[in-house]
Image: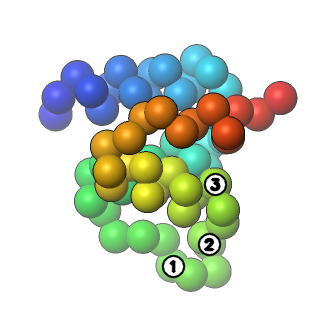
Amino acid sequence: MNNEYYESIDKMEKANVSREYVVGWASGYLHNPKREEQRLNDAYEAGYIDGEGKNSDNFGEWVEK
């Protein structure tokens, strides 16, 4: 595993990003299959898409207050 993955996850966790987004991002990054349909939500799906594209720039929209 490369450092990009670990650094991105660490940055998201320190920024208090939604857990669903982080899990989606990690799943997409690792090319894991998506969750079953009834467990999908907007944060997970956005994270999955960003993870697939190895994009860690959009997580700011999912920071929890």
Question: Which of pointers 1 and 3 indicates the residue nearer the eye?
Answer: 3
| Pointer 1 with pointer 3, Cβ within 8 A | no
Q: Position of residue 28 (x, y in %)?
A: 36, 56
Mark 2 residue element: helix
Question: Which of pointers 2 and 3 indicates the residue nearer the eye?
Answer: 3
| Residue depicted at x 60% and y 70% | 40
Mark 3 residue element: helix
Amino acid marked by disc 1 = Glu
Mark 1 residue element: loop
Q: Position of residue 63 (x, y in %)?
A: 70, 33
Amino acid marked by disc 2 = Arg
| Residue depicted at x 51% and y 79% | 36
Q: CA distance from mark 1 to mark 3?
A: 15 Å
| Residue depicted at x 61% and y 50% | 20
Which label was assigned to residue 43?
3
Please name the residue that numbered disc 2 is placed on. Answer: 39
Please rate how many residues cluster around mark 1, counting C-alpha atoms within 10 Å: few if below 14, some from 14 to 19, many from 20: few
Q: Position of residue 1 (x, y in %)?
A: 16, 34
| Pointer 2 with pointer 3, Cβ within 8 A | no
Q: Is residue 20 visible?
A: yes
| Residue depicted at x 57% and y 47% | 21
Which label was assigned to residue 36?
1
| Pointer 2 with pointer 1, Cβ within 8 A | yes
Which corner quadrant holds the C terminus? top right
Query: Which comes before the other along the chain, label 1 or label 3?
Result: 1
Please rate how many residues cluster around mark 3, counting C-alpha atoms within 10 Å: few if below 14, some from 14 to 19, many from 20: many
